[in-house]
Image (spheres, grey):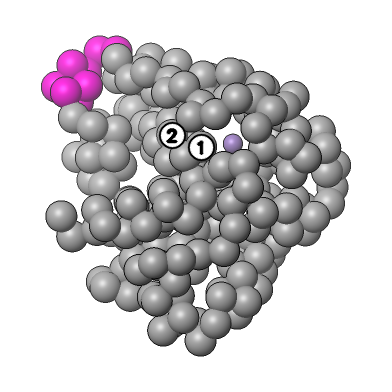
Amino acid sequence: MYKLPDLPYAYDALEPFIDEQTMRVHHDKHHQGYTDKFNQALSEYPEFQEKSAEELLRDLDVIPQEIRMAVKNNGGGYVNHSFFWPLLKKNGGEPSGEILKLITNHFNQYDEFRQQFSLAALNLFGSGWAWLVVDRGQLEIVATQNQDSPLSQGKTPLLALDVWEHAYYLKYQNKRADYIEAFFNIINWDQVNKNLEAVGQ
Ligand code: MN3
């Protein structure tokens, strides 16, 4: 059984950028829902339950066709949200350490990265995620639809932003751009550096 991870902070820790009620519904209802449906999909396939959820997403082709879409969607929802929560923190700030070096090398400056990431998040039509990933040793900003994971494209995520309406609608209504701007106040760059350290290990 895959287990819903606890939030690594209080529900109201990200106020005023992300409100307590959104965090409660997002974690306790949406993330729990993906977790339950993911377990349900695999309930009759014990051989796949032994693998990590990330491993399943990296190789969807080996998943039996009758549950492949459920694993892609709900396994994706399970993994993406588990990855997302630790990327947020109260009093986040600007990047430092290795990730700052890489961002500066690749985007010239942090502001340029911020603009490109924001555009990817803003321009994604419908529901999905914006990501900073490593693809064959290179940083890249990508967007995915629904709960699709970059892992399924052979890419390793470093940073993610959930741009489903359930992530921001209670506070921001239709103003996705304001939610994206708020996000940059609560990024846990230490966690991004940890994700970076894990690449290639
Ligand atoms: Mn979500």
Type of amino acid under label 2? Ser
**Is label 2 within 8 A of ligand 1 (CB to nearest ligand atom)?**
no
| As drawn, 83 above or below 160 | above
- The residue lying at 50 percent from left, 64 percent from top is 95
- The residue lying at 37 percent from left, 18 percent from top is 3
**Is label 1 within 8 A of ligand 1 (CB to nearest ligand atom)?**
no
- The residue lying at 24 percent from left, 53 percent from top is 198
Look at mark 1 in the image and give the residue it sits on.
85
Q: Quadrant of residue 121?
A: bottom right
Q: Given this view, does label 2 or label 1 mark the residue nearer the observer? A: 1
200 in the magenta segment = no
Look at mark 2 in the image and give the residue it sits on.
82
Q: Residues within 10 Å of mark 2 (few under 14, many from 20)?
A: some
Q: Position of residue 69 (x, y in %)?
A: 40, 35
Report how far apart the C-alphas of labels 2 and 1 lie in the structure: 6 Å
Q: Position of residue 148 (x, y in %)?
A: 45, 47
Specify start and end residues of the magenta stretch as a single range. Answer: 43-50
Kind of element beneath mark 2: helix
Kind of element beneath mark 1: helix
Q: Quadrant of residue 40?
A: top left
Q: Label 1 near label 2: C-beta < 8 Å?
A: yes
Type of amino acid under label 1? Trp
Mark sitting on residue 194: none
Name the image quarter holding the N terminus. top left
Residue 55 horizontal side relative to residue 177, left or right? left
